[in-house]
Amino acid sequence: MRRYDAADPDFEGAFTALLATRHGGGERVDAKVADIIDAVRHQGDTALCDYTARFDRLTLDADRLRVTEAEIAQACGSVEPALLAALDLAATRIEAFHRLQLPSDLRHQDAAGLTLGLRWTPLDRVGIYVPGGKAAYPSSVLMNAIPARVAGVTGIAMCVPTPDGILNPLVLAAARRAGVSEIYRVGGAQAIAALAYGTATIAPVDRIVGPGNAYVAEAKRQVFGHVGIDSVAGPSEVVIVADGANTPDHVALDLLAQAEHDEMAQSILITDSTAFADAVAAAVQRLLPSLPRAAIAGASWRDFGAIILVGALPEAAGLVNRLAPEHLQLMVDDPAPLFRSIRHAGAIFVGRDCPEAIGDYVGGPNHVLPTSGAARYASGLSVHDFLKRTTWIKAGAAALRVVGPAAVTLATAEGLHAHARSVSVRLPPPEA
Amino acid sequence: MRRYDAADPDFEGAFTALLATRHGGGERVDAKVADIIDAVRHQGDTALCDYTARFDRLTLDADRLRVTEAEIAQACGSVEPALLAALDLAATRIEAFHRLQLPSDLRHQDAAGLTLGLRWTPLDRVGIYVPGGKAAYPSSVLMNAIPARVAGVTGIAMCVPTPDGILNPLVLAAARRAGVSEIYRVGGAQAIAALAYGTATIAPVDRIVGPGNAYVAEAKRQVFGHVGIDSVAGPSEVVIVADGANTPDHVALDLLAQAEHDEMAQSILITDSTAFADAVAAAVQRLLPSLPRAAIAGASWRDFGAIILVGALPEAAGLVNRLAPEHLQLMVDDPAPLFRSIRHAGAIFVGRDCPEAIGDYVGGPNHVLPTSGAARYASGLSVHDFLKRTTWIKAGAAALRVVGPAAVTLATAEGLHAHARSVSVRLPPPEA
C-alpha cells in the first residue's frame, strides 16, 4: 500500500504514476486463439470435444455438450433452500431495476411533414460466457443474463467450462432463474468461437458477453465484427471517499472486499483525516489474516492499495474523475455535493451503510462495470446492451419538396450525383 | 448484378452465398500501424509532422498542426450562400432529431428502502476523424459532431488530412456549424494515435469516431481500450423492397446512389414483380452512363448488385432480417405490416418518395449506421454514443437489514468472505 498526501509538492507526479499502474499488458495469446477459432469454424463440434478433453480433462460426445434439463433440475434440487432464496431475492431486484431502464421508441412529426422515429429491438440470440472453477460466480450469471431477458432476447445460450466434468449447482440454478435457454459445458476460446460461428450443436449468437481469462478475452476481440462483444474487463477497483467519522473496520473490510478478487485488484481510500487513514491502515493489517483469501487480498493491497490524504473532501472529486473508478463509495455526512461533481465512475455507493458488496449481489444495478479508467467513456452492462436502435424516416411528395432541394445541393457538392438525382427525380421540375 | 428467384429450388444456397459475400477481408496493416502509434506516443508532434510531410506532402511546424480561426473564417466565407443554407438546414434537422434522443436519469426508491438510480453523463472530450480528399464529406462531419454536441460534450477535436495542404472549405464550414472545438490537419493512423494518447498540441480524447481507410480502422482497433471507438464501417448497402407500382427510374437511381459510394457497395432490390424487376434492371443500365461516377457505380452493381424475386411481398421480411441491411427502403402501398416484421436494419425509409439520400443529408436521423449485417446487434450513431451511464445505490442501516443477509449468503457461497463481512459487520448481531 502506498500513501499519498495531496499537499505534497510531488503529489501530481506520484498520482499520475498511480493512474498509469492500471494499464497492464497480459500474456500474448493471439496466434493460439486464432488456431482454436479456425478449428472450431472448420471442425465444429469435433473441435469442441477435442479441446474439452484436452483443457478440461472431460471426454464428451457432441450430444453431451449441452447440459440436459434433468441435470439442471438435479443441480437445482441440490442447492440449499436459503441459498435459492437469496438467489431469488437478488434476481428479483436485478430484474426490477433493469426493467426501469427499458427505453421508449420515438415518433415525431415535424413542421416539414416528415415523420421521424427510432425503434428499439431486442437482439435475437446472445451468448453468455461464465468462467469455470472457482471464478464461476452465480451472481455474474444473473447480472449478464437478466438484462438480456428483460430486453426481450429469446435465445440466451450460456457456455461454462466444467473441469473434470464438475458442474457448479449454484451456477446452474442462477442460469435457470435468470432465464438462460441453453447451457453448454464448453469453455475457453473454443466456446467463444462456437457462440460466434455456430456448430451443429450450438446455434450462433449475435452478441457475446461475460468475463473470462486471457484466451476468452482475445477470442472475443477476434470474433468482434462478426458478432458484438462487451468490453474486456480489467482488474476490479474501488475508490472510497470517507471522512474521519466512519468506523475504520467498515472501510477496511470494504477495501479488502475489492482486494480479495485478485492480486491485481485495486483499493484506494481518499480521506481528509490522517488519524482515520492510520486507523484504516491498521485495521486492514489486523483483519487480513482472518480472511480465507488473505494471500490474494494481501498481495493486492500491498502492490496496488493506496491511501490518499486530501486537505478537504471536495478535493476528492477531481482525483476521482481522473481515476474514473469502476466502483466509488461516498461515506461522508453530506454526499450530495460530491455526488454532483463526480463525472466518471461505473457505479456509486452512497452512505456509510452501503458497501460495494451490496451492488455485487442484491442492490439491483448491474455489477458488470467499466474498469481501468474506461468509465470515462463506457458504461456498465444494461438492457441497452441487448437492444439496438433502428431509426426511420417517412416522407411523402409534399415533405420531399420542403427538404429535398437542400439534399440535392449537398449531394452535388459532395460529387454524389446519383444521390442528388434520386431526390431531384421525385421533385417537380424547376419553374421555367 | 445477379438475379434470384425465391421460388427456385436452389434459392436457399444462392441466398446464403449472397450473405457471405459481405464479409470481406482487407489489407493487413497491423504492424505498420503499431509502428506509427508507437512513434506518436514517444515523439508526439514531431512524429505527426514527419508523417504529414511523408503521406500528405505537407511540411509543417507543430504550431501549424491546428487550423486557425482565421483559416476557418476564410474558408466559410468562400462557400456559396446556397450551400451554407443547405448545410444549415441539414444541421438544424439533425440537431432537432438527436435532441429527442436525450435519455432521462432514473431515480427509484424501492420497498426495501434503498434508493437506486442511473445518471447519464456526457464524455469530456471526443475525437472526430474525417477522411481527406474526395471522401471528406461535410455531411459526415455534421453526423459525427452534432450528436456529441447535443449530448453535452464540450471538447470536440477533429482531425482531417489535407493532402498537399489543401483544406476543403465545406468541411470546415460543417465543422464550425456542428460545434467542433478544434481542427487539426493530420490524418491516418497518426491522427488516431494523437487523439488517443495526446501530444503537446493535441489533448487526448476519451472516444474516437468517424470513418477512415484501412490504416485508420486498424489504428482505432489498436487504441481501443485506452479510449472508446465506434465500430468499423464496411461497404455501404441498401435493400429496397418495392412493388410493381413504383417508377422504375426512381428505384434505379436509389440503387445507383448506393452503388456510387464505392466498388464494394451493395444494392439489392426485392420485388414481387418480374416485369418491374426487368424494368429496373434496364433503367439501371440506361442511367449508369450519365453518372459522373459511372465506373464506380457500374462495378458495384456488376459485382454486388442483386435483384430478388419473391412470390409475395411479406416474404421479403425474412430475407431482410437475414441481410440486416444498413439501409432499407419500403416502397409499397401499405408498408406498416412489413415495417413491423423487420427486426434488423440500421435505418428504414418508408414511402415511395423517401429515397435513402434524404437520410444521408437532411432527414435528421444519423447516417452513420451498422454495415455488413451488424444491424443484428449494433445501432447507428446517436447521442447515446457520447454519454455514459453511472448507476448508484443509496442505502442506510434499515435498508441494509432488509437486503444485507441475502448478500452475505451469496458472497459466502462464492467464497468471498471479505465481501460477506463488509455487509455483516454493519448488521445487528444475530439474535442469541
Image (cartoon, coloured by chain):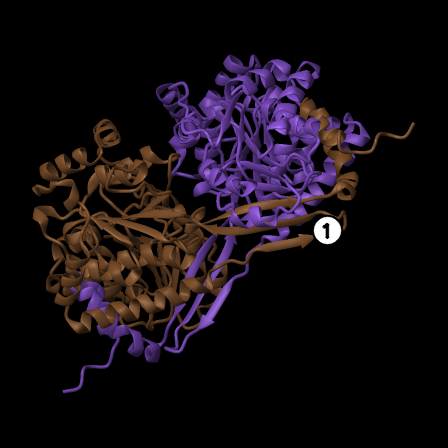
Chain colours: A purple, B brown
Kindly state the secondary structure of the residue where label 1 is placed: loop
Left or right, A103 with respect to B214, comes to right
Coordinates of residue A20 in the picture (x, y in percent): 40, 28
Circle 1 chain: B
Coordinates of residue A418 in the picture (x, y in percent): 19, 64
- Nearer to the camera, B14 or A404: A404
Coordinates of residue B130 in the picture (x, y in percent): 23, 50
* Residue that numbered label 1 is attached to: B110
Left or right, B389 with respect to B13, comes to right
Q: Which quadrant would residue B297 be assigned to in this image?
A: bottom left
Left or right, B191 with respect to A350, comes to left
**Residue B96 appears in the rendering:** yes
Answer above or below: position of A125 versus B150: above
Extreme residue toward the bottom, this view: A432
Q: Tag 1: residue type?
A: Asp
The mark total stands at 1
Specify few, some or many for label 1: CA neighbours under 10 Å numbering under 14, 14-19, or 20 or more: few
Left or right, B184 with respect to A258, comes to left
Answer above or below: position of B141 versus A256: below
Answer above or below: position of A102 versus A203: below
Of the 4 image quadrants, the one containing the N terminus of chain A is: top right
**Residue B255 appears in the rendering:** no
- Nearer to the camera, B131 or A280: A280
Coordinates of residue B420 in the picture (x, y in percent): 71, 27
- Nearer to the camera, B208 or A253: A253
Residue at horizontal 57%, vertical 49%? A337
- Nearer to the camera, B32 or A159: B32
Of the 4 image quadrants, the one containing the C terminus of chain A is: bottom left
Q: Which quadrant would residue B413 be assigned to in this image?
A: top right
Answer above or below: position of A45 versus A97: above
